[in-house]
Amino acid sequence: MRRMLPIIAGLVLASGAGLAADRAWAQQDADPAACTTFDWPILREQAWFEAPSLPRLDSGATLSAEMPGAVLALKPVAGADLPLTPSREPKPGTFGGSLRIPPVVTPGLYQVTLSDNAWIDVSQDGATTRKPVASTMRPGCPGVSKSVRFQFGTTPILVVVSGAKSDSIKIAVAPAE
């Protein structure tokens, strides 16, 4: 056993070095300056996503108007039972989920922002998807990947996220700034 200790210690150090290298690689891809090059401001959404009190919601839950951001729990897309068929076929092995938004008081331009890359579909009748007005993505921005703008009326809103690479994603829905 004493002869094994140096080997085990070496493996632990090597795996720790691997983790450090992985973190360094991820930080190398992160570029805070990229956050200022979106087509519209996303600093508000970044702040929401970093809030320690950011609620965690199951797929199908309703997003509170008091905190327009949340961590949405996703399921493997094959068994996600999405209430609306995604307008883009999700790749096998990805994740999806849905979020309900109460009717907005003021109709107009709203943006749906995600922390990671995924597909966004929005419906206000539960059957047809709304076409986005505009979309912006910037690789390297830590904490925000994309933001899509939609014109909303005063009926309830259904947001379907699909094609995500992990089982949760941060999402915010708010009036455009």
Image: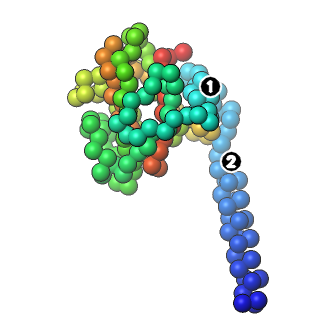
Give percent across and percent down for residue 92.
34, 54
Mark 2 highlights which residue?
27
> The residue under label 2 is which amino acid type?
Gln
Give percent across and percent down for residue 1.
72, 90
Residue situated in front as seen by the camera: 81 or 165: 81
Indicate left or right for 65 with 47 as reference: left
Residue occupying image coordinates x 55% and y 34%: 54
Residue occupying image coordinates x 50% and y 21%: 66
Mark 1 highlights which residue?
43
Circles 2 and 1 in contact, beta carbons < 8 Å: no
> The residue under label 1 is which amino acid type?
Leu
Q: Which mark is residue 151?
A: none
Q: To which quarter of the image does residue 20 belong?
A: bottom right
Residue situated in front as seen by the camera: 38 or 118: 118
Indicate left or right for 29 with 57 as reference: right
Give percent across and percent down for residue 31.
67, 39
Q: Is residue 151 above or below residue 34?
A: above
- Can residue 142 be seen in the rendering of this structure? yes
- Can residue 131 be seen in the rendering of this structure? no
Q: Secondary structure at mark 2?
A: helix
Q: Secondary structure at mark 1?
A: helix
Q: Is residue 134 above or below residue 154?
A: below
Q: Alpha carbon of mark 2 to alpha carbon of mark 1: how far?
A: 19 Å
The extreme left residue here reads 127
